[in-house]
Amino acid sequence: MPDAVIVDIVRSASGRGKPGGALSGLHPVDLLATVLRALVTRTGIDPALIDDVITGCVGQAAEQAANIGRNAVLAAGWPLTVPGTTVDRACGSGQQALHFAAQGVLAGAYDVVVACGVESMSRVPMGVAIGTADPFGPGVAARLAGGGLVPQGIAAELVTARWGFTREQLDAYAARSHALAAAATDAGAFAREIVAVGEHTRDETIRAQTTPEGLAGLRPAFHDPAYTERFPQIGWHITAGSSSPLTDGAAAALIMSAARASELGLRPRARFHAFALAGDDPVMMLTAPIPATRKVLAKAGLGIGDIDAYEVNEAFAPVPLAWAADLGADPQRLNPRGGAIALGHPLGGSGVRLMATLVNHLEQTGGRYGLQTMCEAGGQANATIVERL
């Protein structure tokens, strides 16, 4: 079986996902196209060789409708012969694009493929694709006795309550994310992964001066009396500060077999080592990274101590904290350059963004194995292990 390798991987800097954000003036098709062009420019590959472009995007409505993957290929100026498709596994859409691309190479279906992701939350707000419709239907409601599914903020409160995290722990973790991201930025650690979008080259979502004391003054973001009776265990500890911000961003990876890279004179940066998916309680929603990680470690024949860095998406602070507590993970290896609380969470683009940060961290620190996982709406998760080459 051939190896599936990452030849290069790039991302935009994050933009605040609201009007006036650094990337809010750019159509999401053109945002993704800018990153795709940068990937080709950096590697020198002829885009005509690309068999497919697989794009993660969650809000597939309005300006992100009509197969944004194919539209970005056209906007990038690539040959009309290059196809593109768009996938949705909620927040894991970009990571799923990586899985599909690498698995296509391993299966012999692709020689050269791009996995990418994009979300413009300033221009296509969360929930636009649903509107006032019911996407679940009576079957899901009947399956989930006791009141049905809940918003993700409520799920984050449920995770907080189950693991017994205090408000102080959540605020301390959120402040850590900003401090690490700011330090990495100042040290130039993100320079290789970020490509310019116009003049924008610095993550706009990092707040370097964030402190636990400052976060302590924020009000709970999801307090809702409607859920108090159903979930009396909730302490209402999640704030905007311990949540990932609305974000605009895009990222892309060039993936192929090691043999094809050699033929093209390209040097791979990392190898896909193992993949896993998991489902978990869709009401608790955010805990599936735990079983997904156990599955991917078993497939790889590795233990958590063999992994040099873990990228666990910081949708909310209790998600990586619960993951680390349950798996006995080394907190120093967890999101060592900060996570989505500071670097942003452009939904469909986050899976590829995390991988860009992970690959660069392994290269710059000499680590061998990296693990990436992220929670997804509906109680799912992807997990991926890569090996630095």
Image (spheres, helix red, strand yellow):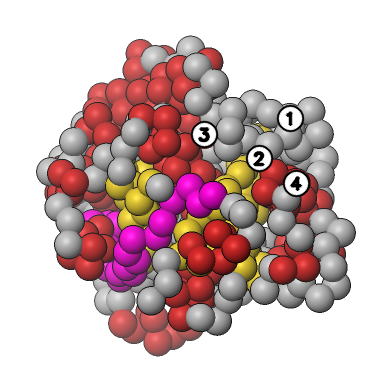
Tell me the kind of residue under disc 3.
Leu
- Residue at the spot 66% in from the left edge and 72% down from the top edge: 52
Pointer 1: what residue? 200
Q: Is residue 283 magenta?
A: yes
Crowding near pointer 3: few (<14 within 10 Å), some, many (20+)? Answer: many
Contact? badges 4 and 3 (CB < 8 Å): no
Which residue in the rendered view is the most extreme toward the bottom? 139
Tell me the kind of residue under disc 2.
Ser
Mark positioned earlier in the residue sequence (1 or 2): 2
User: What kind of element bears circle 4?
Assistant: helix
Pointer 4: what residue? 41
The quarter of the picture where the N terminus appears is: bottom left
Contact? badges 4 and 1 (CB < 8 Å): no
The nearer-to-camera label among 4 and 1 is: 4
- Residue at the spot 18% in from the left edge and 46% down from the top edge: 306
Pointer 2: what residue? 12
What is the x, y in percent for residue 278?
30, 69
User: What kind of element bears circle 3?
Assistant: helix
Q: Is residue 331 left or right of residue 348?
A: left
Pointer 3: what residue? 343
Tell me the kind of residue under disc 4.
Thr
**Can you tell which mark lies on residue 358?**
none
Mark positioned earlier in the residue sequence (4 or 1): 4
Q: Tell me if I can see residue 154 in this picture.
A: no
Q: CA distance from mark 2 to mark 4?
A: 15 Å
Q: CA distance from mark 4 to mark 1?
A: 18 Å
Q: Tell me if I can see residue 64 in this picture.
A: yes
Q: Which residues are magenta?
A: 267-292
- Residue at the spot 55% in from the left edge and 81% down from the top edge: 109
Contact? badges 1 and 2 (CB < 8 Å): yes
